């Protein structure tokens, strides 16, 4: 059995002891408890081995962490993020949006230097027009060569637009185009890249537009709408041929969260299902896994959803709860390859201030006996025996070769199975 979410916390402080080989959760705290408060309230992102934690309340910086030689998650750098709106990281690029740093807004573009692993500020992008809420959202394409910057406007009647910037082989960023949609209302509220696609939501309507890159330009390919009029998008995520839209009822978002899931088939985006997940804080979606963070009183919960069962329907396949931290608060959540990270900006481990924390979880593991623990952890703890050393607990392996149906008994059913399969193997 393969799982894609683990949410049992084991508090290990980055920079102190090496992460153990078997863990179900890893708590990462700021390097200094006096450096800041609400660490992670500006968002959380992952790119490769790098983890990015944004701090907007006091520090106005983005902390960059990655595993050291012993596997311990360690802060390696902090970069400036003044008046942080949001940020995006992919490949070797970190883009920081600051919608209110000036009357025009700006985007700071950092590039990872291969020789040092440090991120250097290489470009500052500003708008020439004020009052458009430029740099409200930013998104970096998977290859790191395209940057989308939104300017949804300040009024519900503003059309909004999204500026597209391209990076030349020499590393120079330049404006390559501007995306608009006839009749749109605050286009650019949320952005999401995947491959050659860019999804853009409107801020004052229930529409999400999907653009496809054709050569060097992006062309509007489809427009999808939420299930009920007035359910405005409060987050979108593209992954492969699936689009997830988080919506709240009406402009105030006063009722239950709804996650609309659309899939692309034969050129048409079709709604597959709608999940009502009341009380959710944030979400991320990648490679078929929808991870959602929740705030439940003083506890944090993560739930993971995917298609499963004979009917291939979307269902919750893992729910985990952490009670660590008296004033915990679930913030952003990020899925990257085999790692899930969740920001807890009001986590208070022992100090008088809410320093904040990030929690990392194994995203893929094998649990053949379905006890909620990774097989190698069972073996290491001695709760399972692995007599042949193949990292699979003995209780999961069939020691009786004639028990073809695996029910623990050799009987007529096994003989029938043998006779049914008698003959030349295909």
Image (cartoon, helix red, strand yellow):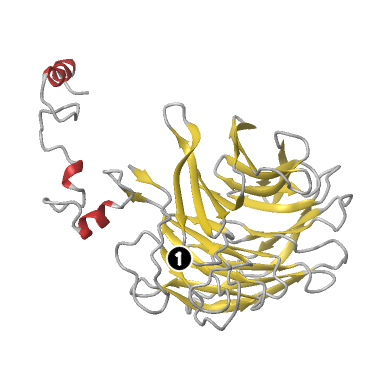
Quadrant housing the N terminus: top left
Residue 143 placed where, x, y %?
A: 56, 58
Can residue 90 be seen in the rendering of this structure? Answer: no
Front one among 315 and 254: 254
Q: Residue at x 50, y 48 (%)?
A: 303
Residue 136 placed where, x, y %?
A: 75, 61
Can residue 367 be seen in the rendering of this structure? Answer: yes
Q: Secondary structure at mark 1?
A: loop
Residue 225 placed where, x, y %?
A: 72, 37
Residue 11, picture quadrant: bottom left
Front one among 266 and 293: 293
Q: Residue at x 58, y 68 (%)?
A: 346
Q: Identify whether 60 is placed above or below 280.
A: below
Q: Residue at x 85, y 71 (%)?
A: 103
**Residue bearing mark 1:** 49
Residue 97 placed where, x, y %?
A: 70, 67
Instruction: Answer few, some or many: residues within 10 Å of disc 1's Cα (few below 14, many 20 plus, some between 14 and 19).
Output: few
Residue 110, picture quadrant: bottom right
């Amino acid at each position: 059995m393969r799982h894609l979410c683990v949410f049992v916390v084991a508090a290990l402080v980055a920079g102190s002891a090496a992460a153990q080989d078997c863990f179900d959760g890893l708590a990462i705290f700021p390097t200094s408890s006096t450096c800041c408060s609400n660490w992670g309230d500006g968002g959380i992102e992952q790119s490769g081995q790098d983890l990015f934690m944004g701090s907007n309340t006091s520090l106005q910086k983005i902390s960059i962490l990655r595993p050291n030689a012993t596997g311990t998650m360690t802060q390696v750098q902090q970069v400036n993020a003044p008046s942080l709106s949001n940020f995006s990281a992919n490949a070797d690029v970190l883009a920081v949006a600051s919608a209110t740093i000036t009357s025009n807004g700006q985007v700071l573009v950092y590039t990872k230097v291969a020789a040092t692993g440090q991120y250097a500020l290489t470009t500052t992008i500003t708008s020439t027009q004020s009052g458009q809420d430029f740099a409200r959202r930013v998104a970096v394409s998977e290859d790191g060569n395209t940057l989308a910057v939104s300017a949804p406007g300040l009024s519900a009647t503003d059309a909004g637009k999204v500026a597209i910037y391209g990076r030349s082989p020499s590393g120079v960023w330049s404006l390559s185009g501007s995306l608009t949609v006839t009749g749109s209302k605050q286009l650019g509220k949320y952005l999401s890249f995947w491959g050659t696609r860019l999804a853009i939501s409107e801020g004052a309507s229930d529409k999400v537009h999907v653009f496809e890159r054709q050569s060097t330009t992006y062309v509007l390919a489809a427009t999808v709408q939420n299930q009920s009029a007035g359910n405005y998008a409060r987050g979108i995520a593209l992954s492969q041929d699936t689009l997830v839209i988080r919506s709240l009822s009406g402009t105030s978002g006063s009722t239950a969260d709804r996650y609309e899931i659309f899939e692309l088939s034969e050129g048409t985006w079709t709604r597959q299902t709608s999940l009502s997940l009341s009380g959710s804080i944030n979400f991320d979606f990648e490679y078929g896994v929808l991870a959602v963070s929740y705030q439940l009183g003083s506890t944090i919960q993560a739930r993971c959803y995917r298609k499963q069962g004979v009917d291939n329907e979307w269902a919750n396949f893992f729910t985990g709860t952490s009670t660590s931290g008296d004033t915990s608060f679930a913030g952003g959540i990020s899925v990257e390859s085999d790692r899930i990270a969740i920001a807890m900006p009001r986590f208070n481990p022992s100090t008088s201030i809410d320093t904040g924390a990030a929690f990392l979880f194994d995203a893929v593991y094998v649990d053949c006996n379905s006890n909620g623990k990774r097989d190698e952890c069972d073996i290491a703890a001695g709760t399972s025996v692995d007599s042949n050393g193949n990292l699979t607990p003995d209780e999961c392996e069939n020691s009786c070769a004639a028990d073809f149906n695996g029910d623990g008994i050799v009987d007529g059913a096994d003989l029938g199975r043998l006779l049914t399969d008698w003959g030349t193997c295909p």
